[in-house]
Image: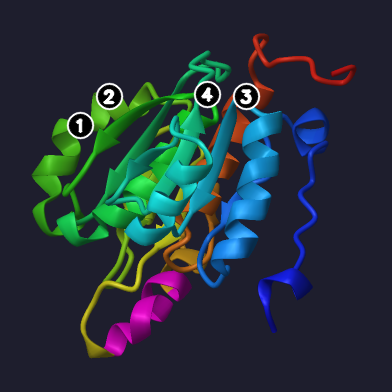
Amino acid sequence: MDDSACQCVPDLQREQRIGFAEVVYCAGKSDGQLREVARALFAAHRNVLATRCSPQQFALLQEVDARVQYHPSARIACLHEDRTLYGRGVIAVVSAGSTDVPVAEEAAVTAEVMGNQVERHYDIGVAGLHRLLERREALARAAVVIVVAGMEGALPSVLGGLIPAPVIAVPTSVGYGASFQGLAALLGMLCSCAPGVTVVNIDNGFGAGYAAARINRSCSNTAPDRSHA
């Protein structure tokens, strides 16, 4: 099927309804589809996210709009013209290991482009618990905490019992054979004994960052009123 038969229909009113523009999922899109949807969204909005974006797709997006930036670790391209902080507090993004950082960065960049202050705390997993305890005070001040972990996925449960903020757990596909590409971490997080831990899909840093941004913004008096935009 050629590009002419695969027309995209961008949702240009989504920002008015929920506070942020439609997000482009780049993986699997043809060049024509990506150009079409990006051109419409970039013309209508000041901040736009394009996730799972390859370097080649970023080059294509820059041809559409030279203002587009790229975060290679997060695999996110974005238009980030509005730098206003709409969230009421800090969103902390925690990774258990350094190999979890790409997923953590996807969450962090998503939250930042959506108008939130983000603090990163990477490589502080349970195998070296002293590293986590050294950050406990900073994490306790956060409004929302995103915890990214692979292997057995224990870190969200530990943090869920240490800090008052809501915890959004992100299982990653990092780990050896019996981790089953993140399934072990996912099931461990879903079965957490710490109350208040919410879990997103495997490697879904974007989903965690988006959810954290909406939580943080919903508690803020500075959220923009776009009901009449």
| Above or below: residue 207 compared with residue 67 | below
- The reply to whether callout 1 and callout 3 are in contact (CB within 8 Å) is no
Between the residue at mark 4 and the residue at mark 1, the CA separation in whole angstroms equals: 24 Å
Among the 4 quarters of the image, the one containing residue 172 = bottom left
> Where is residue 88 shown, x and y percent of the image?
55, 16
Between the residue at mark 1 and the residue at mark 2, the CA separation in whole angstroms equals: 5 Å
Residue 138's mark? 2
Specify the segment rendered in magenta. 178-187
| Above or below: residue 88 compared with residue 184 | above
Mark 4 or mark 1: whose residue is earlier in sequence: 4
- The reply to whether callout 1 and callout 2 are in contact (CB within 8 Å) is yes
For disc 1, the marked residue is 135
> Where is residue 75 shown, x and y percent of the image?
37, 54
Which residue type carries mark 2? Ala
Mark 3 or mark 4: whose residue is earlier in sequence: 4
For disc 4, the marked residue is 115
Between the residue at mark 2 and the residue at mark 4, the CA separation in whole angstroms equals: 20 Å
- The reply to whether callout 4 and callout 1 are in contact (CB within 8 Å) is no
Nearest the eye: 71 or 44: 44
- The reply to whether callout 2 and callout 4 are in contact (CB within 8 Å) is no
The quadrant of the picture occupied by the N terminus is: bottom right
**Which residue is drawn at the image coordinates 24% and 90% (left, top)?**
177
For disc 3, the marked residue is 217
**Which residue is drawn at the image coordinates 38% and 55% (left, top)?**
157
